[in-house]
Image (spheres, rainbow, N blue to C red):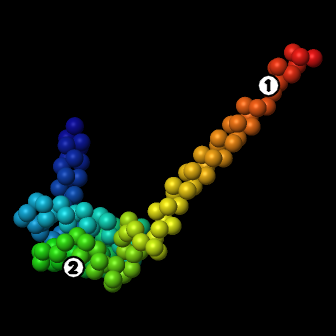
Amino acid sequence: MRKLVACVLLVTLASPALAIDTDKAFDDPQLQARYEHIIEEVRCLKCQNQSIKDSNAFLAGDLRREIRRMLAEGKTDDEIYDFLVARYGEFALYRPRMSGKTLVLWIAPILLLLAGGFVLVNILRRRMAMPIDGDAAAEE
């Protein structure tokens, strides 16, 4: 039992040491929530499969500080996203904006689902029209 308590205590005490974003949280909870949301939506350009919230890369740290600074200056989320896209391109955002360039990304899943549904309906219609083997044997 003592070992279990010791392990739980060590894990609890070690978790702040594992934190990536070590900067002081905003005093305003809404501002902190906006900051957390934005850093979850921005891709680490070095790691590419992590958000800057989860990345400990130097570039991710710089982007977190830059976003924190812009929020403190009163910039809107759209202004921050515009800055990131202007500097790093649409790839920096996990959810690209709806535009002519990204229209295919937004429409392709819907078209693929519709095409899959059409194929499924056609297959089911053909199978329903086929005679059942038991019925064919009974007729003979």
Which residue occupies 22% across, 47% down?
8
Asked where in the image residue 133 lies, by quadrant, the reply is top right
Task: Tell me the residue that label 2 is attached to.
Answer: 66
User: Identity of the amino acid at label 2?
Assistant: Glu
Which residue occupies 86% across, 22% down?
136
Residue lying at the far bottom in this picture: please name it. 87
Residue nearest the observer in this picture, 138 or 114: 114
Describe residue 34's horizontal placement relative to residue 126 as left or right: left
Q: Marks 2 and 1: which is nearer the front?
A: 1
Find numbered disc 2 in the image and state the secondary structure of the residue it sits on: helix
Residue 96 visible in the snapshot: no
Find numbered disc 1 in the image and state the secondary structure of the residue it sits on: loop
Residue nearest the observer in this picture, 24 or 115: 115
Quarter of the image where the C terminus is located: top right
User: Identity of the amino acid at label 1?
Assistant: Ile
Q: Is residue 23 above or below residue 112?
A: below
Q: Is residue 134 above or below residue 101?
A: above
- Density class for disc 2 (Cα within 10 Å; few <14, some 14-19, many ≥20) is some
* Spot occupied by residue 137 in the image (x, y as percentages of width and height): 88, 19
Which residue occupies 22% across, 58% down?
15
Q: Is residue 137 above or below residue 31?
A: above
Describe residue 40's horizontal placement relative to residue 123 as left or right: left
* Spot occupied by residue 67 in the image (x, y as percentages of width and height): 21, 75
Task: Tell me the residue that label 1 is attached to.
Answer: 132
User: Along the polypeptide, which appears first: circle 2 or circle 1?
Assistant: 2
User: Where residue 10 is drawn, which disc sits there?
Assistant: none
Asked where in the image residue 98 lies, by quadrant, the reply is bottom left
* Spot occupied by residue 101 in the image (x, y as percentages of width and height): 47, 74
